[in-house]
Structure formats: C-alpha cells, structure tokens
Amino acid sequence: MRRGWKVPALYLATTCTSSHFALGFVSHQLSTAAKASAWKPASSLIYGSPSSGSTFTRRNMSSEVVPAKDYGPTDQSWRSLLEVSMARSRKIRGSNYVQISTATKDGEPRCRTVVFRGFLNNKNLPEDHPMSASGNVDGKPCVMKMCTDLRSNKVAEVAHQPISEMVWWFPKTSEQYRVRGSLLLVGDDSGDRDLQIARKELWGNLSDPARESFLDDKLPVPVGGRDDEGKVVPVPENFLLMLLDPIHVDFLRLTGAQYRQIDERQSGPDGSTWSAKSVKP
Ligand SMILES: Cc1cc2nc3c(=O)[nH]c(=O)nc-3n(C[C@H](O)[C@H](O)[C@H](O)COP(=O)(O)O)c2cc1C
C-alpha cells in the first residue's frame, strides 16, 4: 500500500473539513425535518436541478431524511441520501474509502480502493461546462473527486474505457451505493482551466505523506511535498485529479425493510435532470 493512502483521518481534517462540518449541519437539519415529515411510499419520482428549469414532483425532497427506526421507501434523490449516509458515518475511519472499477483492453475487470475526496465545487464553472451546476441534484453538486497517480494502471484503462462503477458501502447504516459514470483524469495535459484549479486545490489539501507519494521519483524527495520554506511544491505531473461524473446510481439499504432505489440522469439541451424509482428486490 502506498504510504500516502494511510491517512484518512488527516485527510478528513484537511480536504474535507468544511464539507464535513456542512454535512454535520445538514444532518442535524435533516433529522429535525424528518420528525415533521410523513413517509409516503415513492414508487417513482422525478427531480432535476432548479437551474435546468425542471419541476420537482415532490416538495422539500432534500430536506427529508429517513428516521433511524423507520427505514423504507424514501422520497429523496441518491445525492440527498448519500449526504445523510456520509454524515452518519463521518466519524468512522475509512468511511471515505470507495472501490472504483475499470476494464482492461481485453475487457477484464479491475477494481481498487481509493479515497473519496468530496464533490467538485461547480458553482463557478461556466454554464456550458460539461460539469456545470446543471448536473446537480437537489441543488447539490454530484461530480465526485478522487486523485490518482499517472503511473498507475487505471490511467491506460480509463483512456480505453472511461465508464466506471464506484461501490461505496456504509457498514454503520448498512447501505450500499453503486455509482456509475465516466471517469475523467485531469493531468498536466488538460487544457481545462477550471479543472486545473480544482486539481491544484486538491494537491494543496492532501496530507504531507500523501503528497510525498506522488514525488517519490524525485531526488531528493521533497519532504511532505514542501520546499525549504514549508510551502507546498507545484503540482507534479504524477498527480491526477480523478472525477466521476455519475449517470446512474443504485442505492440499497439492508436495514429493516430492504429498500432499493435507482436514480438515472438524462441529459438534454437545457442541462440534466435526474429521475428515481424504487425497485424490488
Ligand atoms: C485504503 C486505501 C486507499 C487508497 N487510496 C487511493 C487513492 O486515493 N488513489 C489511488 O490512486 N490509489 C489509492 N489506493 C491504492 C489503490 O487501491 C491501487 O492499489 C492503486 O491505485 C493502483 O491501482 P491500479 O494500478 O489498478 O491503477 C488506496 C489503497 C488503499 C488500501
């Protein structure tokens, strides 16, 4: 195992500090809202980003939460469900580890653990950017950030077949998310200024050991990925921002009455909308 991947706690304290605080806050808000909300079975629902002009068939969808002892059909998008799952597990070591699959040129599957590093802040992306806010659900960004090394096998695999599936298991709440979409690797060769900014930001937010692991072909290795004055060194070629742009999410909750929901994204000229349906089994 690379040394840098062993530090999720530090990662939480650096990369995700603000978003986890936000999640905690959201979780509190959601729990409060849940007490007031009645639970109706939802066999099918449609929602989309307010910016895309689509209608929500159910109001307040993002402000409801499944009460701990009342699992069942939900009225929420995968993104709102995930927000709650993350908040409930945020203190658990490794709760931000996800598995990412790729395929080799011969069609053989490959799967590995990586660290989920939050959602891409797409608020300031131009409207016509492929990852703009029009792909949001319930006003929340959906593009998932990770990072990887240019020297790893997945780079060639993604170039050949960008479609990937991420699996995220939350043992505390017995929930699984299978998130399918395109993987995009952002390295030195990417001319996308906005994504380069996100790449640089993520580089700066890594823990020192994680940063060092991308520089281990340099002699001498800059300790902690910092220069003599303690400043973070420039983003090295090996460091890639890895983005998963979801189009299909399969959610399964095993606690209580088993519940499965499939969310799908449809892209249109005015942006994206998501729809969801509960399925059995
Ligand atoms: C807990 C844990 C976290 C990891 N996090 C990452 C990560 O964030 N990014 C990454 O590229 N590899 C990470 N790795 C290493 C990968 O699992 C994998 O070994 C590496 O990416 C090479 O895979 P590949 O050659 O198939 O591309 C992690 C491994 C473990 C065990």
Image: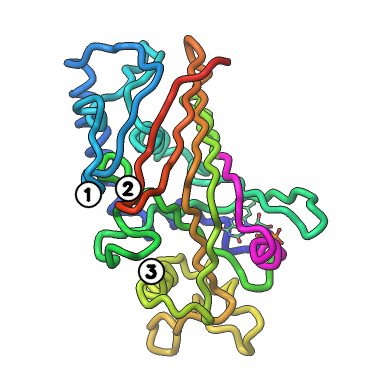
Distance Cα–Cα, label 2 vs label 1:
9 Å
The residue mark sitting in front, 3 or 1, is 1
Dot 2 or dot 1: first in sequence order is 1
Q: Amino acid at mark 1?
A: Ser
In the displayed orientation, state which residue is furthest to the front.
269
Distance Cα–Cα, label 2 vs label 3:
17 Å
Residue 156 at x, y = what percent? 70, 67
Determine whether label 2 and label 1 are within 8 Å by CB.
yes
Secondary structure of the residue carrying tag 1 is: helix
Residue 163 in the magenta stretch? The answer is: yes
Residue 111 at x, y = what percent? 69, 49
Distance Cα–Cα, label 3 vs label 1:
22 Å
| Above or below, 228 relative to 82 | below
Residue at which label 3 appears: 198
Camera sees residue 87: yes
Residue closer to the observer: 147 or 28: 147
Dot 2 or dot 3: first in sequence order is 2
Determine whether label 3 and label 1 are within 8 Å by CB.
no
The residue located at (50%, 71%) in the rendering is: 186
Camera sees residue 209: no
| Above or below, 135 relative to 156 | above
Residue at which label 2 appears: 136
Q: Which mark is residue 51?
A: 1
Q: Which residues are magenta?
A: 153-167
Q: Quadrant of residue 206?
A: bottom left
Residue 257 in the magenta stretch? The answer is: no
Residue 194 at x, y = what percent? 35, 72
The residue mark sitting in front, 2 or 3, is 2
Determine whether label 2 and label 3 are within 8 Å by CB.
no
The residue located at (64%, 89%) in the rendering is: 219
Q: Amino acid at mark 2?
A: Asn
